[in-house]
Image: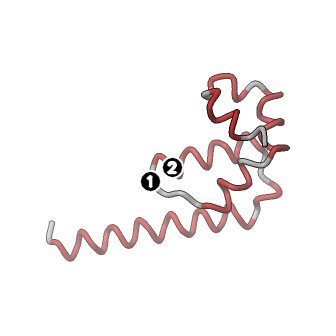
Amino acid sequence: MEPCKNVDALRIGLRFLEIMASAVTTYLYHVSSENLLNAVCSFCMMNHFPLVLINQLLQKDVINELLLSGVCSLMPSSFLLLSQD
């Protein structure tokens, strides 16, 4: 693949991730805590870190809801300590 095509592919991929993050952000208050966690994990695995979604995920009420649902049972305790402020 030519260098120019690589750059174009990266731009298209980044634009796609930005559009997807924008769509999730638009409906943020309709997204369950578990789905928000899944979305943030998916974005992070693709090396994209949408701060609005991450900040929402780190809210005490969201973390408490995830803890009560048992979703966070495998989450490292160091992450949970960050949310105790």
In the picture, the quarter occupied by the C terminus is top right
Residue 3 placement, left or right of 36 = left
Q: Residue at x 71, y 29 (%)?
A: 71
For the residue pair 77 and 50, the one nearer the viewer reads as 77
Q: Residue at x 30, y 74 (%)?
A: 8
In the picture shown, does residue 38 fall above or below 6? Answer: above
Image location of residue 63, percent across then percent down: 77, 39
* Residue that mark 1 sits on: 47
Q: Residue at x 57, y 44 (%)?
A: 41
* Residue that mark 2 sits on: 44
Secondary element at image label 1: loop
- Mark 1 crowd level (few <14, some 14–19, many ≥20, 10 Å Cα): few
Q: Are marks 2 and 1 in contact (CB under 8 Å)?
A: yes
Residue 17 placement, left or right of 56 = left
**Amino acid residing under circle 1:** Asn
- Mark 2 crowd level (few <14, some 14–19, many ≥20, 10 Å Cα): few
Secondary element at image label 2: helix
Q: Residue at x 78, y 38 (%)?
A: 84
Give me the C-alpha separation between circle 2 and circle 1: 5 Å
